[in-house]
Structure formats: structure tokens, C-alpha cells
Amino acid sequence: MKKQPNINFGAAILFLIFSLLFFVLIFRFVSIQVTGEAAGHALAAKAQQKYEREKTIQAKRGTIYDRNGEVIAEDTISYKLVAILDKSMEPDYVKDPEKTAAALSKAIDMEESEIYKILTRKTKDGETPFQVEFGKEGRDLPLKTKKEIEDMKLPGITFITDSKRFYPNGVFASHLVGYVEKKKSETNKTDTVGMLGIEQSLNNVLTGKDGKFSYESDIWGYLLPNGDQKIKPAQNGKDVYLTIDKKIQTFLEDSMNKVDEEYKPKKMVAVVADPKTGEILAMGQRPSFHPKTKEGLEETWHNEVIENSFEPGSTMKIFTLAAAIEEGVFDPNELFKSGSYKVTENSPAIRDHNQGRGWGSITYLEGVQRSSNVAFAKIVKEKLGYEKYREYITKFGFEDPTGIDLPNETGGQIAYEWPLDKVTTGFGQGSAITPIQQVQAATAIANDGKMMQPHVISSIVDSDKNEIVKKTKPEVKGNPISAETAKKTRDILETVVSSEKGTGYKRYNIEGYEVAGKTGTAQIPDPNGGGYLTGHENFIFSFLGMAPKDNPELIIYVAVQQPDIDLSTNGAEPVSKIFKPVMKSSLQYLNIEPAKEQKANSEQAPEVEGKTVEEAKAELKKSGFEAIVVGKGSKVERQVPGNMYTLLEGERVILRTDGELTVPDMTSWSLRDVMKVAKLADLKLNTVGSGYVVKQNLKAGSTLKEGDYLIVELEPPAEKYNEENPESEEQQEEEEAVLD
């Protein structure tokens, strides 16, 4: 009885405490319900943060294409190999490192011991890391390798899906296209960043914007069936179409590889351009690099075509000649004394390249053909005058960068202070210009006076919207000369190649096509100071040419620096081994017909279309031509060449009949005759070598179909060539020449 009051009192106290707690909880609950906040934080936002998940939708970097839609650089899916080492991930962790290392060494390019070392790695604290990666050898794995490893069913081995930049053509206009690297941003995100070339200059255009996928999940992270979902689509990078033609670029890369292997020059550059539009169809250099592996990149970071100016040598004479013709001061038949020439009494004598011996009193036309320095020094000083010639240097764009759509372009360095500087600039010494400046200036010669700005970007396309964002239009940079002057200049430059006196004779001739161009041999300044390097090979040998001469479709510039050649080898040889195959293959690829040469002992072919085969053969034979019948019919439907063309006596005329087409025996035929058949029968022609046919893929007498591939192998008739083209004394001097 005495304890009862104490118990009742204690119970009352407990009741009051629990009642107070209950009212506090009720108040808190009502307060949260009304305000939606706790401790100053919005609970709805906290809940959303906890249960709403967000994933990144990765944007694709834009693809780079050639002019025909062939892929040059694109993003592809790749896989990164990862190993889970944390035992808490049972059963998905690496249980047997030794067995796993042995299996993986068969799939990736790593030694078993290296893999085992990675799989047993410890942190600085001696702890086992949650997961490990395998470095370079474990990244950018193709799907085939991923499947191979998955089939091994190795516990703890998994993959992370990634993207990589793929360059399907390997070393292919590498300094023009550029490459990419993956770099971590300030937010610890890995970004793909363009380095060099188009990848760098258009990095913002090629780079897309990542999207987001937000969704509500349960506490385990699974998508709730009725939860809210928000999608912000990724904006893929824009695609870039270049003016580069994959086929022509491949011709160029293959030829440069052969010359690089045979002559091992210090440097090479080459450019192929369309003179009518300024489009760059191919651009290459050596040393170069592989854009994926970066092999070779340490040898040169510069695009030598646009970033390096040097003394051009005698290719500069093209523009000095054009200026003189435009001003009406060039008389091809006027005589001058070759050998040496003094600009002023106190200046050193300018000498012709055959040790200053010259060729006696010769015409200015022969001076161009022989690449006489004296001829061009006299043209600058006595014909044009220093001030007038200086105007043409500006008109041809040799001072300023061309504005080509590539990064880091430099301009020319024109030395034009003293009289000697002025005349030497006229024949390519003293002043320095870039290869792309020479190509731009040459478009005026090839394009009837209109100088076109070079460019490599054809268009930029938004693939998400399927619309063209930017389209590059041909731009005329100036009209330094008239169309008439351009034609006269080409006619004279063609004799540099076709005349026995020309420095390009027997080196840059292309059967079936007339080539106009100019050789160049530029001195190299001694890096230690005090003049120029000496020695047979210590020059930059070059050629700037265009074809066909009357209506040039292509301009090609090639320069080869310090090739490994002996005294018996002319520096023009490695240059010609790039120019000739690239020009010839490109003209044929573009279906440019060869020139129709007219000779004194020639006449027009008779019209035989519509006549019987026998009548046609008899009439052609009577006129001195050989008839080749392609077909089993009895009536001639078409002839090539037609009666509008003048042919050489004995030349073949191809006749297509009304029956099935048949393959003629083309053994010992010239390329010109083979092209007649290809044109008449609508065949796709590929050639190997030069000279006359020794082999054909289509059997003589077999049936032809339009669109068939005709492949012929040609070889030069060496003995016949040497008999018909004996090397003159003057030509021997050209072989021994150091400067042209």
C-alpha cells in the first residue's frame, strides 16, 4: 500500500513524457507536411535526388569524308578491358589471377607476366583495388577481341563500352586531316580533342553535345514502371566533307612511299589541285605519321605545304615569264648572251646552272627551256623593270597567306631591297614562299588568268537535321594576267617538257597528254650561316606542272629535299617518279582524254560509219590507216577516232559493229590506242607501267560487255627508245647540272 502512490506518480511522469514526445512528433509531421522542408532542406528535392537517376547520352564526333563520301575519319565503338578484384563482388571477381593472365595473354598484346602483375596489384595501403585496367593494350579493343575474351568465361573480366577515332586509310593526308587525343576536363570528364589539321581547326564543329536521360528508380536503382522520364537528346558533331579525292590521294601516297623507300630524302611535299575551283584533291608529305598510333609524329608536327616557306628555285620563273608576256616585253625569238650577267658593277655575277658556261647566244625561248638564270635576270631588270615586277609579285599573291582553310598557314618572305635581291627573286632565289602559294599562283596560268583561292573543305553537314550548314564556293583571288597571256605561257612551258633542250625533257612527258610545267632546283641555306649547302644532293628539287596543256584539269607540285643520290643520278628523278604516275593515273581516273596530236605526215580519217565492215576496212587502208574491228556484226556503228580528227599515217582506227563486241589483241599497242577501245566499248581502264602493251586481262576474241574492266600491263621498249632518242651533248650537260 505504501508503494502504490510512488508507482502511480512514476506512471504519471512517464505518461506526461510520452505525451509530450507524441505531440512533438505530431507537430513535426504536420509542419513538414505543410512546409515541405526539414532542417531548411526541401524534402521533395532530396527524395528526387535519391530516387531520380541520370545517365549521359554520349554525342558522336562528326565524320570526315572525302569529296565522294568515302570515310577518312569517324567514331566507332570500342571496348576497354577491366578486371574486378574486390572479393565483395562474389562471384564476379578474379578468383584465379594466374589462370586469367594465361588466358588473356592469348587475346591481347601483353605478356602473361605483365597481366599477372596487374591482376595482383595492391594499393599504397596494401589493399586490393576494386578494379584494374590494362593500359594501352586493353583499350580500343574491337568487337572480335571482346567476343573472344567473353567466350573464355573468365570471372571478374568485363568491358566498358567506349568510342574511338578510326582512320581507315592509315597514313593518308595525315597533316591535313590531323588526329585526336582524349583529355580530362576540369569536371574530370574525358573529352576527345582534335590535334593538327581539320581535326583541330574544326574541333568545335566536329564535337557534339552530350544528351541526358533522367528517370525515377527504386532504392536499388531499377527503373520505376510509372516513374517520370526525361530525355535530352545528344547533338552529334557535324560531318565535314573535304575536297580531297581518296583515289588521287592514294595515288600520291603510294608514289611518295616508293620514292621515300628508294631515295630516303630529308623531306617531301606534294599537292594536287583543280585549277578551275581551287579545290585541293590531294596533299601529302614525308615524314608523315599514322593518325591512330601517332607513329612518326615526333619527326614533324608541321604541315610543310602551308607552314614552311623556302626558296622555290626555278619554278618561280613561270610567274616571271607570265608577267613579261602580259606586259608585252617577252620576244621568244630575241637573242641574248647566256652564261653570266652582272646586275651592277659591284654585284657578283649571276651565272647559268652549267657552271656559268652558258650556251652562247640563244633566244629567250631557249633560255626558258634551258632554265637560264641570265635570261630571267635580264627580263626582270631590262624588260619589266624592278617596280613593275614587284607589282606582279603582289598580284600573284606571294606576300600574304592564301587563306586556305587549314590552321597555322604562313606567308611569303620577299627580299626586294637591293638590285641583286630583285633579279634573284625573278628566278627563285633569295625570297621564300610556300608550296601552297605556288599552287595558288599556278591556277592563274592554268585557269585563263583567274587565280583561285585553294581550299580543302567542301561542305559541313548537320547529320541530325540532314542539312548543309556551310558550302564552300570557288573564290577568285585575283586576275594577275589575261587569258591570252595564260595560254601563251602554257604553250612555252609545254616546250620545257617536249623540247630536247628543255630541262623537263624525257622526265615529265606523259604519253597521250601534253604537260606544261617548270623544273626547279632550290639551294638550301647553310644552318650554320655563311651561304648555301654544297654537294650534289643538297638541294630542293621540284616540278610544278599542269595537264592537259590546252585546258588544264590538274596542277601538281612536287618538291623533294636532299634525296640520297649519287653523281650519276639527276635530282629530277625522284620528283618525276611522283609527278608522272600521279598525273597520269589521275587524268585517266578523271576520264580526261589525251591530246589529239597533229603531225606534218598526217591526214583526217575517212567517215566510215554506216558502211559494211569490208568497205570500211578497204577505205581506211586506202587512206593509210589500220582498221581494228571490235564486234561480230557486218555493219560499222561507230568509229574512234572520228573523221573530225587528224591522225598519223598508219594509226589505228577502232570500228564498233552492230553485233556482239569482241576483244582485240592489243599486244604492243600504245596507251593511246588502248584508250580508243576503252572509249568505244565503254570499258573501265586500268593500266600498270608505261610504254607499250605486253599483257591484257581480257582474252583476245572473247565477248565484251559495257562496263567491263580492261587492265593492261605496259613496258617501255628500251632499245627502240634509246635508238630514237640519243642523248645530245646539251642533254648530258643538263644531267650534270646543279642548278636549273
Image (cartoon, rainbow, N blue to C red):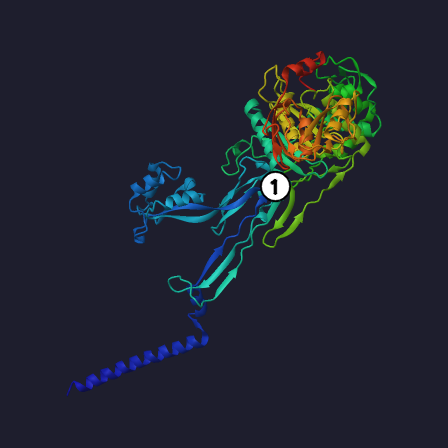
Q: Amino acid at mark 1?
A: Asp
In this rendering, the answer to whether 497 lies above or below 16 is above
Q: Which percent across, then down, holds residue 554?
A: 69, 33
Where is mark 1, residue-wise? 66
Measuring from the top left, give residue 587's x and y in whole percent.
Answer: 67, 32
Label 1 environment density (alpha carbons within 10 Å; few <14, some 14–19, many ≥20): many
Q: Position of residue 468 (x, y in %)?
A: 65, 51
Side (left or right) of 85 relative to 213: left
Tell me the quarter of the picture where residue 434 sits: top right
At mark 1, the secondary structure is loop
What is the quadrant of residue 523 in the picture?
top right
Quadrant containing the N terminus is bottom left
Q: Position of residue 597 (x, y in %)?
A: 75, 25
Residue 398 appears in the picture as rendered: no
The residue most toward the bottom is 1
In the current view of this chain or complex, which residue is farthest to the right? 328
What is the quadrant of the C terminus in the image? top right
Front-most of residues 191 and 25: 191
Q: Is residue 372 above or below residue 72?
A: above
Residue under the image location 48 percent in, 56 percent down: 56
Quadrant in the rendering for residue 285: top right
Vertically, is 735 above or below 438?
above
Tag count: 1
User: Eyeballing the image, is 690 above or below 449?
Assistant: above
Note whether residue 185 is visible: yes
In this picture, residue 114 sits left or right of residue 740: left
